Amino acid sequence: MPQPADTRLSLLRSLRFCAGHRLLGHEGRCAYLHGHNYRVEVEVEAAGGGTEVDAVGRVVDFSLIKRRLLGWLDDHWDHAFILWEEDATALAAVRLAEPTKYFLLPWNPTAENMARYLLEVVAPHVLTDLGVIARRVAVWETEESCAIATRGGDTDEPALDLAAAVIVDSRA
């Protein structure tokens, strides 16, 4: 059945991971090293306007989003400390632990900046050949609080090179 031309279709996939961070310069408790059970929601639509579906009637199979994005999260952020590359003291503290796993973010690891990084940097790389564009990423730090990054326009060009990311897992 044909879809009306003004109907945009998208799908939302929810993923979970656990990680630690701290917010450099925060005025409260978030200035300390601490952790969260994060939930990430990624919304994708078909490239070219979000009106096309495959022969089955899907924007894309949910399992492909899970495999690609959760795979990246498991490898890079799950059970790691996500730190701002300019946070020298937190980085020094985390490096003292053995084994250690950390990821250096180019910005302070607020939920907003984590959502932005996933939307602008990670999603364009890991979803590149699926024929979809990530439109929105929500990062939930708690059951009550999340930050949302939303992409405007039809481009899905990465803001940063994914290969520039620094991930250290001392077990490897």
Image (spheres, grey):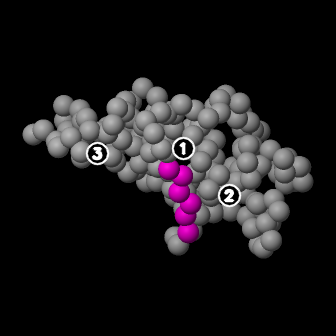
| Main secondary structure of the magenta stretch | strand
Residue range corresponding to the magenta coloring? 145-150
- Indicate the amino acid at tag 1: Leu
Q: Nearer the viewer, residue 166 or 133?
A: 133
Quarter residue 53 falls in: top left
Neighbor class of circle 1 (other Cα within 10 Å; few <14, some 14-19, many 20+) is: many
Element type at mark 2: loop
**Residue highlighted by disc 3:** 8
Q: Residue at x 39, y 30 (%)?
A: 130
**Residue highlighted by disc 2:** 110
- Indicate the amino acid at tag 2: Thr
Can I make out residue 129 in this image? yes
- State which quarter of the image contains the C terminus: top right
Residue 60 in the image: above or below residue 37 = above
Mark sitting earlier along the chain (1/2)? 2
The answer to whether mark 3 and mark 1 are in CB contact below 8 A is no
Whether the magenta-drawn stretch holds residue 148 is answered as yes
- Indicate the amino acid at tag 3: Arg
Q: Residue at x 65, y 33 (%)?
A: 160
Q: Position of residue 21 (x, y in %)?
A: 72, 57
**Residue highlighted by disc 1:** 119
Q: Nearer the viewer, residue 67 or 59?
A: 59
Q: CA distance from mark 3 to mark 1?
A: 19 Å
Q: Position of residue 152 (x, y in %)?
A: 48, 44
Whether the magenta-drawn stretch holds residue 100 is answered as no
Q: Is residue 118 left or right of residue 19?
A: left
Neighbor class of circle 3 (other Cα within 10 Å; few <14, some 14-19, many 20+) is: few
Q: CA distance from mark 1 to mark 2?
A: 14 Å
